[in-house]
Image: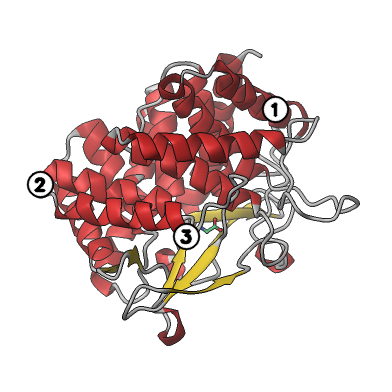
Amino acid sequence: MDYARIIDQAVAKFRRSAAMAEQEGIIPYKCENGRWITSPWDGNSWWTGGFWPGLMWLLHTLSGDDFFKAEARRTEKLLVDELSSFVDLHHDVGFMYLLSTGADWKITGDEQSKIHTQHAASIMMGRFNPAGFIRAWNGADKAGYAIIDCMMNLSLLFWASRATGDPRFAHAARIHADTTMREFIRPNGSSSHIVEFDPFTGARVAEHPGQGYCLGSQWSRGQAWGLYGFTLAYLNTYEERYLHTACRIADNFIAHIRPDGLTDCDFCQPADELRLDNIAGMIAACGLLELARPAGNSAYEAAARRLVDGVIEHCCDWTDASCGILTHCTASYHDDGAGRHTNITYGDYFLVEALAKLTGKDPMLWL
Ligand code: GLY
């Protein structure tokens, strides 16, 4: 597969469609009827807000075009405004600010962006419950909720310890990762989505079904968050137990890749159900590409290529009928209203990150 040519196509397409986002003044969430729409939930505090500026930074790195840098900074500013209103923020400040303010600091050295990223890390640190986990969501009944997705956000805490020289952030991240390893990861290498703990004692109270098919099933995006998240935990700490866990999750994920290289929304969904989530495949591809070298396992890179080649062959829209590229993205198994078999910006983010890795040009915004 000629990944460099696919990158050129992506750069050309987003040059056109990012201009539309800029005219609208929004952070795109997904494409609907040939137009970007912003998140219908919680405005710019919605967890996905960082993927658009992150995508713009990737495209800037890949093309050298300052148009993408300007678009990244336009939307970075909207996210920085959210730091002051604060009430709707959550553990996904990792996704939001590593890929926006953190990326700006990493790529340009902008000091103010570094300060904003430290602010976001402090918000995440404030969600750490010393009973052993990072609280995921807001709401009076969710004080004990932790979710597998949080493994990706831990990188913000590890980053903050490196940036400040203060180990507290990394201590909290390690404690959460160890709890996740113990309480989420099943003997077959699959992961639960939501585990509820007693917020006073840290005892496990219940598992909840979340965005997958049913309780005890394997929501594929959750598996991918775990795969890439534990890989990042290893790259942040060089602790062997995280590498081992990432490999167990990877082996289970690879066993469920469809013959066409696409990814089912849940690995336990009924066999006659066609419900794909290619975002999961692209997150997993990125994780596998990072994992292959430390694991010493070239099968991980081969699996990542199968996933990327699968979507390039079957699920990329290069026409202007869609503002984005990756098709057949599904937000949640039982909530078609949130997006089913559609284009969602974080799918494109991970597709372009995977392409950047495959061509040796990834700025690695997570570390
Ligand atoms: N982190 C939420 C999701 O993957 O839908």
Q: Position of residue 150 (x, y in %)?
A: 42, 56
Left or right of 258 on screen, residue 12: left
Above or below, 46 against 140 in this view is: above
Residue 164 image label? 2
Task: State the SS at label 3.
Answer: helix
Q: CA distance from mark 3 to mark 2?
A: 30 Å
Amino acid at the residue labelled 3:
Glu
Q: Please tell me which residue lies in front, 14 or 216.
A: 216
Farthest front residue?
187
Q: Please tell me which residue lies in front, 12 or 178.
A: 178
Q: Position of residue 65 (x, y in %)?
A: 39, 26
Q: Earlier in the sequence, mark 1 or mark 2?
A: 2
Left or right of 213 on screen, residue 238: left
Can you tell which of label 3 and label 2 is closer to the viewer? 3
**Would you name the residue on which mark 1 appears?**
312
Can you tell which of label 1 and label 2 is closer to the viewer? 2
**Would you name the residue on which mark 3 appears?**
183
Q: Earlier in the sequence, mark 3 or mark 2?
A: 2
Q: CA distance from mark 1 to mark 3?
A: 36 Å
